[in-house]
Amino acid sequence: MDTILSVMKAMNSEPIMVLVQVGLFYVFHMMMSQILYKPMIKARRERRALTIDNILAAWKLNEETITTKREYEEKIRLAKQEALEKVQAAQKKVEHLRQERLETGRVESESIIEEARADIAAAQGLTTAELEARVPHLALQMAGRILLSVTYGVERDRLQADFRREGLR
């Protein structure tokens, strides 16, 4: 209290004025509390609570996102693995089909070759038989030409007539 009185003397004020000023300050403070401070404090508390709620929601959302991302990556990994297995199975199937077709083609080509050989042999046999059938006729024609070339006169005319009659010319 002595300090207050010494301050008042230094300011040349009266104690009642100081008390009135302190009282007015207290009334001003109470009014400001009701009008400004309490709503500000309430707004700060609400904002802080909202911020904390938002942070918690963000953490939860972040955890859900991380979980979803892991599930997504696992599904992608499984899908890639499944696709790779399907591709490998398809490659095996294609290779098997290719081997089957090659084998079928080889068998068919061997069959065609055998048929061609048989056709060639048959044609060769027919040609040989035809040639063998024509050989006597050709031999007679050759003999006739030789005879005609070495004979003269009436004998030659008679031979030519015989050959025409036989159809050897």
Image (cartoon, helix red, strand yellow):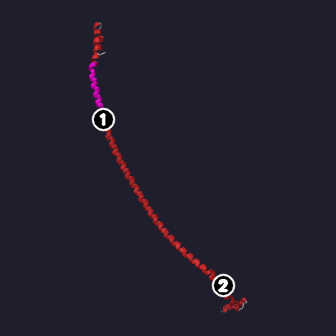
Q: Nearer the viewer, residue 41 or 150?
A: 41
Q: Amino acid at mark 1?
A: Glu
Residue 142 seen in this snapshot: no
Relative side of 62 to 143, left or right: right
Label 1 sits on residue: 115
Residue 129, quarter of the rendered image: top left
Q: Which residues are magenta?
A: 118-137
Q: In the structure shown, which secondary structural element does the residue marked by tag 1 occupy? A: helix
Magenta-highlighted stretch: main secondary structure? helix
| Residue 94 higher or lower than 159, as above or below | below
Q: Is residue 156 magenta?
A: no
| Residue 6 higher or lower than 140, as above or below | below
Residue 121, quarter of the rendered image: top left
Residue 83 seen in this snapshot: yes
At a point 44% along the width and 61% down the height, the residue shown is: 73
Q: Amino acid at mark 2?
A: Phe
At a point 45% along the width and 66% down the height, the residue shown is: 67
Label 2 sits on residue: 28
Could you tell me which quadrant the N terminus lies in?
bottom right
Q: Residue 27, position in %: x, y? A: 65, 86
